[in-house]
Amino acid sequence: MPNRSISPNDVIPRPTAAFCWQNPVCYALIALLIVLGFAPAAKSEILDNPLGITFHSEDRSVSFTSKFPGGRMNECVQIADDDFAVTIQPESDPINDSAWYAFRVNSTEERTISVRLKYVGGSHRYDPKISRDGKNWESAEHLMADRHPAGTEVRLKIPVDGKPLWVAGQELLSSGTVAKWTSDLSQQPHVKRSVIGKSVQGRPLYRLDITETDHPDFVFIIARQHPPEVSGAIGMMHFVDALTSDNELATSFRKRYCAVVVPTVNPDGVALGNWRCNANGVDLNRDWMHFTQPETRALRNEMLKCRNAADQKLCLFMDFHSTYDDVFYTPPRDADLYPAGFTDNWLSAIQKRFPNYHVNGDDNHHAHRSTSKAWVADTLGVTAITYEFGDETDRETIRRVASGSAEEMMKLLLALPEPDSQMAAAQVSIQR
Ligand SMILES: [Zn+2]
């Protein structure tokens, strides 16, 4: 199905009721549009943020809205002419404290407004970023005028004028934007896109297969279990871009391996502007023991499929996230995982490649046994790494390190001895 660039700005036309339902010609027209891949009403419903709200000042000269994918503003009140309070609240409680906010301000005239972000059930984590078009963003830490010592409230002084201004905790990276990226990648002959299932609210879970062989071993890459973790998603996109490159290294990699990528594991949470969870209020990265959610079940089934053929195996798993600083959460050093020694070799290679960048490996991080990393390592016997980029890591550094670490991964996996099919079969049976 053809895809087009989707941004939070997009106004997707809905056919009017009178035109559609009273005119039989319209049915045919709509059917044709759907066949051609333009399903305006359906697509709009998928992209809408039903939790979004809009607020107008008393004289209607200032308005706020969170009615766009990723928007989060639970309440807005006007305290004085240019003074507003915006309540930011998580989708469930208790919750990991990752207080996400995103709204758009419009003003009929040039002025500076005061916006108090009042956090309920959490505290300030993300310093503001701003955008004029919802696509190009810049850090706007300078807008922070005051901060409550406990972080439960911050006050922003925001200059506004006749043009819309987006204010958010991180760049808005909607599922639509990521889906467009997957669609663009799949124009290359060695990239195939498919849908592995649907989220709670029916949004597609896209899968990319990046390979040039029919009998690959697999590397499984996922991101965005946690909606606000945008820097991790940016890192994943640069990492995956390196695997699709035209250079000799990536071509050799694809002739032996398949990188399977599920770039947005929690599309509902991303659309709804959730702090942490999916639409059922479940933290997906705490659901890898009981698999109660459609998103985690779909991933588990895909991963198990990678090992169905006797001469194929899953070699490596990476789950991209964000936290306060860049860190690789790795399995314990003494864990008996395939490929043996990969983690140490990989982190050393990245450090050697970027001598001025501190490669921060942590093999002692056992946040919870029901994370994706724990399940893959414990159940499948495969090296599993949670690859975290810092919330505020410079985006150019993310690009360089993510691309470079992808190349070092490819080199190490290509250096593994190629087992003959009997050995591979034995490996598979051991893993099972
Ligand atoms: Zn996370």
Image: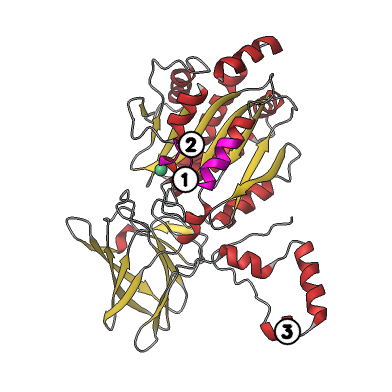
Which colour style is shown? secondary structure
Horizontal arrangement in the rendering, residue 98 relative to residue 232 (left or right) = left
- Location of the N terminus by quadrant is bottom right
- Mark 2: amino acid: Asp
**Is there a contact, CB below 8 Å, between mark 2 and mark 3?**
no
Highlighted range, magenta: 286-301
Residue type (three-letter) at the residue carrying disc 3: Phe
**Residue at mark 2:** 319
- Residue at the spot x=40%, y=83% of the render? 109
Quarter of the image holding residue 2? Answer: bottom right
Which of pointers 3 and 1 lies earlier in the amino acid sequence?
A: 3
Q: Quadrant of residue 327?
A: top left
Ligand number 1: quarter of image: top left
Along the line of sight, which residue is nearer the eye, 109 or 192?
Answer: 192
Report the residue at 41% width, 67% height from top.
103
Secondary structure of residue under mark 1: loop
Front of the two marks 2 and 3: 3
Q: Position of residue 44 (x, y in %)?
A: 61, 67
- Residue matched to label 1: 225
Residue 30 is a magenta residue: no
Residue bearing the label numbered 3: 19
287 magenta-colored: yes
